[in-house]
Amino acid sequence: MTEAQGGFRPPWRRGRRTEAVPEPVPPVLLWHVASVEVGPRAVRRAREAMTACLPAAGVTPGSAFADTVLLALSELVTNVVRHAPRSPVTDVGLSVAAGQLIVSVTDAEPRLPDLTPEGMGAGLWMVTELAAAHGGGVGARPAADHDGKVVLVRFGLPSYDGNTTRSGRNIS
């Protein structure tokens, strides 16, 4: 008689599950929010596109957290306008995963920003501080599908009361 038919089970297998149980993986909600033409209206268009997507990410437009996210986005798009002359268009993205809201800005300039305190300009420094205040951070990597880069800003999502991040940090 086999073990599956209720037969003998060696002591080392008694009380243990024999089948693999997959670990739950938090879903990643990813949106390509907009492709924005780089120019004088780029910041406004990127903000409008992002504002329209915030409710789907669980963020109330007009809230202090939403304003912080939009300020960070504005600074990143401004950096594209100023420092990425090869970019006719910037792609703005939004994703939600594992309790974090992630804003991405992609351009065609392959040079990665200097993320050290000594190397950052005022705008990127402010974005780093805003992200840190919400339990997040800033990173950059080469773009996967072209010769540019992607700058990512992670924010801890506010809890249900809107005043603390899920890690317990007070954001009011």
Image: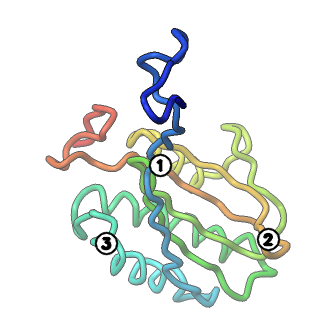
The label number, if any, that marks residue 148 in the structure image? 2
Of residues 27 and 23, the one drawn nearer to the viewer in this rendering: 23
The residue pinned by badge 3 equals: 56
- In the rendered image, which quarter contains the C terminus? top left
- Residue at 36 percent across and 76 percent down: it is 53
Circle 2: element type: loop
- Residue at 44 percent across and 58 percent down: it is 27
Which badge, 1 or 2, comes first in the chain's sequence?
A: 1
Say which amino acid is labelled 1.
Answer: Val
Residue at the far front: name it.
1
The label number, if any, that marks residue 25 in the structure image? 1
Give the percent coordinates (x, y) of residue 110: 84, 66
Which badge, 2 or 3, comes first in the chain's sequence?
A: 3
- Residue at 49 percent across and 66 percent down: it is 73
Circle 1: element type: loop
Say which amino acid is labelled 2.
Answer: Gly
Of residues 136 and 7, the one drawn nearer to the viewer in this rendering: 7
